[in-house]
Image: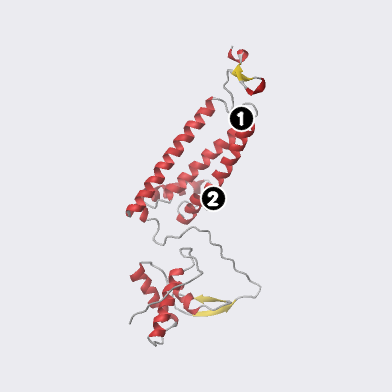
Amino acid sequence: MGLEGEVESTLPSGAGLSSSAALIVSIALALCRAAELELGGLPLARLAQEAEHLAVGVPCGLMDPAVSILGRHGQALLLDCGTEEHRLVRLPAELAIVVVDSGVILGLKGPAWWHDSGVGKFFNSVHLWAVEVFFFAMVVHLWGKFFMGAWRGGRGWTWVTGAVVFLIAIGTAFTGYLSQQNFDSQWIASEGKDGLNSVGIGAFFNVADFGQMYTWHVILLPVAVVALVVWHVLLVRKHGVVPPYAARVADGGRVAPNTEEAT
């Protein structure tokens, strides 16, 4: 028996909403209907779970396909995956559940493709060297402005925003390193978690949680960097670039030698 069909869905793929289980259950129900086979409930959910294990390679549990089959509109499914006892629980009419799609794709096998596939290695290498160039430019820029005393002449916030951007960039690089999911990043995560626990922030910033570190790396910290860079550039446009120590700003905005400071 064969099946030719077309799939259309409003469920975002890779968003952690069990889209693969919903697709497999839909195909299974279509096959059962085409073959006039009476099969449903948990027996069909177990077959869908096995199909994900063997055909797709996703080590999912029973809950995803069971909810796709047994779930009903306006009701929650209370399922004990150990005993397989289940019942529907009616949700209050005033209850609203909001699902927000962040756009960050969930990789069920983790970021293994960064290390295993040719395309993954290419993009991983490009990203690595881009970060190297980025930090080289930032370090040269910061040291240059430090020796120029870039905070002079009412430019304190210009210097502070630039320095804070550098610190946030270090945090972004750290969370990106933890997102590599190789042996090195796992070792650093275990050591870092001990240090963070010792100062009492390990419960809020869990370096062993890949999902949390990936979110910090690709969303939260980059947003902070971009916002501060925009602020930094606006301050530079407002106050201008700091002149050298042995110079003064003459009338008309021209830099003239400052003989008093030079002596």
Crowd rating for badge 2 (residues with CA inside 10 Å; few <14, some 14–19, many 20+): few
Q: Is residue 175 above or below residue 70?
A: above
Q: Residue furthest front?
A: 252
Q: Residue furthest top?
A: 263
Q: Secondary structure at mark 2?
A: helix
- In the visual, does 4 lie left or right of 239? left
Mark 1 or 2: in front is 1
> Residue 7: where, in percent of width, then height?
44, 73
Q: Residue at x 59, y 68 (%)?
A: 97
Residue 61 in view, yes or no: yes
Say the numbered circle drawn on residue 240: 1
**Quadrant of residue 90 within the rendered picture:** bottom right
**Quadrant of residue 33 within the rendered picture:** bottom left
The N terminus appears in which quarter of the rendering?
A: bottom left
- In the visual, does 225 lie left or right of 112? right
Pointers 1 and 2 in contact (C-beta within 8 Å): no
Circle 2: residue type: Leu
Instruction: Tell me how many marks there are.
Output: 2
The residue nearer to you, when weighing 145 against 193, is: 145
The C terminus appears in which quarter of the rendering?
A: top right
Residue 200 in view, yes or no: no
What distance separates the C-alpha of mark 1 from that of mark 2? 30 Å
> Residue 112: where, in percent of width, then height?
36, 56
Say the numbered circle drawn on residue 47: none
Judging by the rendered image, the residue that carries numbered circle 2 is 220
